[in-house]
């Protein structure tokens, strides 16, 4: 059995230790906000925070956790959608289909935590999530707006 | 001028039978809190019945608008709600939307019309009847209030969900008369507001479905959870037309959590487990043997040969005028070129999925679909149950782009569920399955010849397309004398066929011939956002750019000189050029493109640079759109930006190629998609000229690639004529 700290709660996981964190979150813990898009760490739809750092959970076996890590998913980013990135996203109507946005928001919130003054160049180097609807123009605006909200 | 619509003739309004609670699946409340007042508790009252099929008003004045078309991110549901709200004159802050299930549509004599969501038809294809629905509901609410006050209905006005009678100083909220209104006979005629009086249509209101997309709460098809549900992963034969030969179930079926390993049809293996990861890992690990059949050695070289053969084959004509051969033969200068656009996969972020629950007398499906009614028909057929014993519950789509107009995944889900009656089974495709089992953008090439006279005037243009037809594969009954009219999107004559009047040519050429040698490789083609407009805009507009340069004329002036008959086309082109800095003496390389498609006039001006190492940087694209009426400008802007990502991802990276009968590309590592770093700045010019409803989701995608390709030529002097450009040396 693995004890994991997700969104501030200690949860028990009893399954296969090879299972990627993505699927443990979605199937065993009922946290379906984190999405499956590729399974090979290319698209970023599965991005969560492990101790504040953006991690693509589709290739992260749950057995690799030591138990002391704090995992944050989109459901735990804020209680009420009040995180500056969520607020900026709402203000600019960033999502289209929205399927990639939990991962996008988690990647962006990790970037801004590390680098509250992220430049366009920082954004280009760090945010590599795929969005097939093509929300990038508003994602970029949203990041700059979120910087002001912090 | 006011439209008068005769309802009884159209048989539009049906009774006011209340929908059951079962309808509520898929409800999205977009309601924002209207005031700080303490909400009144209406829980002791029975719920109001609907006013009509489109409008359901609750005791608290919340207005639920029914949306038949699917929401896949394009914002149609918000736009349609705006159309209804405009005529209903309700309070926009109290609007919510819901998606009535397609079975309900059938039970009610298709009161909601078409559920098909494609061809940029969401608003333009339903604007008339949804506005009528809102207007009719308003008249009924007024009548109910007038009856209560014993005053003539004509003396009542409405404002933000309140009915007013000034003479008697009376007012009442919609919610308070909704039940009485529902019992009235619907009006047989309504007046629709003229565009000049619109206050909701044309406003950049926020989408109604954003909040739950920001917190992980929105349930997509992939997220659906039900008691006792099992998960399935599928692997169908990746080889074109191949079959399943054998599979080693024994090697995986004893794994913890595996419930069933089965053959599906004659070409697929399915693993069902209590976890999708378990099912998919097992299917990946299992030894499966395929019977490749006749295409076991098929490759992209065979397709290339087939398409090249088309250049010397007979062709069907899409549009023709004058005598192109003699005009070109007698020209001072002749220009020739061959262009090509490959197969491309839709690859929406959410891979295909559907959940089915089958018993001997009922079948239910929950799925993201672009056409609830065709999904229902597919479910009924696969379930071997009459359609009235089946239902499809539409869930929000994690992207569609045309792929979710198909129903193959619904059929599979139902066939799987039939093997385990009474158990809901969610079939989730892996990304790899999604890449291998696409209905790809049709592969074509084009051979062009053009003539110029001594003054650099175009004398004739011959555009011969060779390649795949979508209709021949998916809707053969729509071919006319063996010709696929949709293959000529953007090139068609006006007045020929009302079905394709929205895809007509907006240039006047003295002599021209647009024809198609249909060459169908054994790949499944499909409707891919923008469809055939995408490659036709590249073929026509890049070649016209080549001709302008050969004529030593300004490409803008060259195009405009053939557009006198189409002032709206010329207007968007001029606007894009002007705002995009065309002819600005700043040393930047720019390219233009324009086309008419899906009922809208669109143009783009791209600004690029190519480094000494041959690396392309797309700096900016300025795009102009005349879609007639612009329902929601900020959503149009989002669609234009998004269409560029879709079109430019294809231009930069995307092709499905074949080796040994199967697609080489299997996931985003070898079927790349643009990232934020690749994204140019986009300036969207919305210039609605009024009087018509044009599409928005697709048209601009078609001008993205040709504008950039023409700009690359401006930067380097080198023509790029084959997509994608990823492995090509762009240096001049």
Image (cartoon, coloured by chain):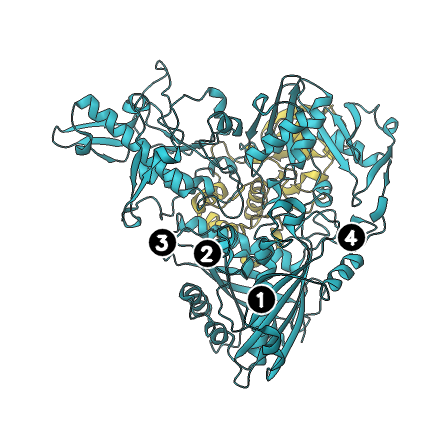
Chain colours: A yellow, B cyan
Farthest-out residue, left: B167
Determine the secondary structure under disc 4.
strand
Which of the numbered marks, if any, corresponds to residue B658? 4
Q: Are marks 4 and 1 in contact (CB under 8 Å)?
A: no
Which of the numbered marks, if any, corresponds to residue B691? 3
- How far apart marks 2 and 1 lie (CA) works out to 17 Å
* Chain hosting mark 3: B
Of the two numbered discs 4 and 1 on the same chain, state the one appearing first in sequence: 1
Please tell me in which quadrant of the rendered image residue B48 appears: top left
Q: Position of residue A12 (x, y in %)?
A: 68, 23
* Chain hosting mark 4: B
Q: Position of residue A101 (x, y in %)?
A: 56, 42
* Chain hosting mark 1: B
**Disc 3: CA contacts within 10 A as few (<14), some (14-19) or many (>=20):** few
Q: Is residue B317 visible?
A: yes
Of the two numbered discs 2 and 1 on the same chain, state the one appearing first in sequence: 1
**Disc 1: CA contacts within 10 A as few (<14), some (14-19) or many (>=20):** many
- How far apart marks 4 and 1 lie (CA) works out to 27 Å
Q: Are marks 4 and 2 on the same chain?
A: yes
* Chain hosting mark 2: B
Of the two numbered discs 2 and 3 on the same chain, state the one appearing first in sequence: 2
Of the two numbered discs 4 and 3 on the same chain, state the one appearing first in sequence: 4
Which of the numbered marks, if any, corresponds to residue B540? 1
């Amino acid at each position: 059995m693995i004890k994991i700290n997700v969104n501030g709660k200690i949860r028990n996981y009893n399954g296969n230790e090879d299972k990627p964190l993505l699927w443990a979150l979605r199937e065993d813990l009922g946290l379906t906000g984190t999405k499956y898009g590729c399974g090979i760490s290319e698209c970023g739809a599965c991005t969560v925070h492990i101790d504040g750092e953006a991690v693509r959970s589709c290739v992260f076996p749950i057995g690799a956790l030591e138990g002391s890590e704090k995992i944050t998913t989109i459901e735990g980013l804020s209680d009420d959608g009040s995180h500056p990135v969520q607020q900026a996203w709402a203000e600019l109507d960033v999502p289209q289909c929205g399927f990639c946005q939990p991962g996008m928001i988690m990647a962006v919130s990790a970037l801004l935590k590390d680098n509250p003054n992220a430049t366009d160049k920082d954004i280009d180097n760090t945010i590599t999530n795929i969005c097939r609807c093509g929300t990038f123009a508003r994602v970029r605006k949203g990041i700059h707006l979120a910087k002001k909200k912090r | 001028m006011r439209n008068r619509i005769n309802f009884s003739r159209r048989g539009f309004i049906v009774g006011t039978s209340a929908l059951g609670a079962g309808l509520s699946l898929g409800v999205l409340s977009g309601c924002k809190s209207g005031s700080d007042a303490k909400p009144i508790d209406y829980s002791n009252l029975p719920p109001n019945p609907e006013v009509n099929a489109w409008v359901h008003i609750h005791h608290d004045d919340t207005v639920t608008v029914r949306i038949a078309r699917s929401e896949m991110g394009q914002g149609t549901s918000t736009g349609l709600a705006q159309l209804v709200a405009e005529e209903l004159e309700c309070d926009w802050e109290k609007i919510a939307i819901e998606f009535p299930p397609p079975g309900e549509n059938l039970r009610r004599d298709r009161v909601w019309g078409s559920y098909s969501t494609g061809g940029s038809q969401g608003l333009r294809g339903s604007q008339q009847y949804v506005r009528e629905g809102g207007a009719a509901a308003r008249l009924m609410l007024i009548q109910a209030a007038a009856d209560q006050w014993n005053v003539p209905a004509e003396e009542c006005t409405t404002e933000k969900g309140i009915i007013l009678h000034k003479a008697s100083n009376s007012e009442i909220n919609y919610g308070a008369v909704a039940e009485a209104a529902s019992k009235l006979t619907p009006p047989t005629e309504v007046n629709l507001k003229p565009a000049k009086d619109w206050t909701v249509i044309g406003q950049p209101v926020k989408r109604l479905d954003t909040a739950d997309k920001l917190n992980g709460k929105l349930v997509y098809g992939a997220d659906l959870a039900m008691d006792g549900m099992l998960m399935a992963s599928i692997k169908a034969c990746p080889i074109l037309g191949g079959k399943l030969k054998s599979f080693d179930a024994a090697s995986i079926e004893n794994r913890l959590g595996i419930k069933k390993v089965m053959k599906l049809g004659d070409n697929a293996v399915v693993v069902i487990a209590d976890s999708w990861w378990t099912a998919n890992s097992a299917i990946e690990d299992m030894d499966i043997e395929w019977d490749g059949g006749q295409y076991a050695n098929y490759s992209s070289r065979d397709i290339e040969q087939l398409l090249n053969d088309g250049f010397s084959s007979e062709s069907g004509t899409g549009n023709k005028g004058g005598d192109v051969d003699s005009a070109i033969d007698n020209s001072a200068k002749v220009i020739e070129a061959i262009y090509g656009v490959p197969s491309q996969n839709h690859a929406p972020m959410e891979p295909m999925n559907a959940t089915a629950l089958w018993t001997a007398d009922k079948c239910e499906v929950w799925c993201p679909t672009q056409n609830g009614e065709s999904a229902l028909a597919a479910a009924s057929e696969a379930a071997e149950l009459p359609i009235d014993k089946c239902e499809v519950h539409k869930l929000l789509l994690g992207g569609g782009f045309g792929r979710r107009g198909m129903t193959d995944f619904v059929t599979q889900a139902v066939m799987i569920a039939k093997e385990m009656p009474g158990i809901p089974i969610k079939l989730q495709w892996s990304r790899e399955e999604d890449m291998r089992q696409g209905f790809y953008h049709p592969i074509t090439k084009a051979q062009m010849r053009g003539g110029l006279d001594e003054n650099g005037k175009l004398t004739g243009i011959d555009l011969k397309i060779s390649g795949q037809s979508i209709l021949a594969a998916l809707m053969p009954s729509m071919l006319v004398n063996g010709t696929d009219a949709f293959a000529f999107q953007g090139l068609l004559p006006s007045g020929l066929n009302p079905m394709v009047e929205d895809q007509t040519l907006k240039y006047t050429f003295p002599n021209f011939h647009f024809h198609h040698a249909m060459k169908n490789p054994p790949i499944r083609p499909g409707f891919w956002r923008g469809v055939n407009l995408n490659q036709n805009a590249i073929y026509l507009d890049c070649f016209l750019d080549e001709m302008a340069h050969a004529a030593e004329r300004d490409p803008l002036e060259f195009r405009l000189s053939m557009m006198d008959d189409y002032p709206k086309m010329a207007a968007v082109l001029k606007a894009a050029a002007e705002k995009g800095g065309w002819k600005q003496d700043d040393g930047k390389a720019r390219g233009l493109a324009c086309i008419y498609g899906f009922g809208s006039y669109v143009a783009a001006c791209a600004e690029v640079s190519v480094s000494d190492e041959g690396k392309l940087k797309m700096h900016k694209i300025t795009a102009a759109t005349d879609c007639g009426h612009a329902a929601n400008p900020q959503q149009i802007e989002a669609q234009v930006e998004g269409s560029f990502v879709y079109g430019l991802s294809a231009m930069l990276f995307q092709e499905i190629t074949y080796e040994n009968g199967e697609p080489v590309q299997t996931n985003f590592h070898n079927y790349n998609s643009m990232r934020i770093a690749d994204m140019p700045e986009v300036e969207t010019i919305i210039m609605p000229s009024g009087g018509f409803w044009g599409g928005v989701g697709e048209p601009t995608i078609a001008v993205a690639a040709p504008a950039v390709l023409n700009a690359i030529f401006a930067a380097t002097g080198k023509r790029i004529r084959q997509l994608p450009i990823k492995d090509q040396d762009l240096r001049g």
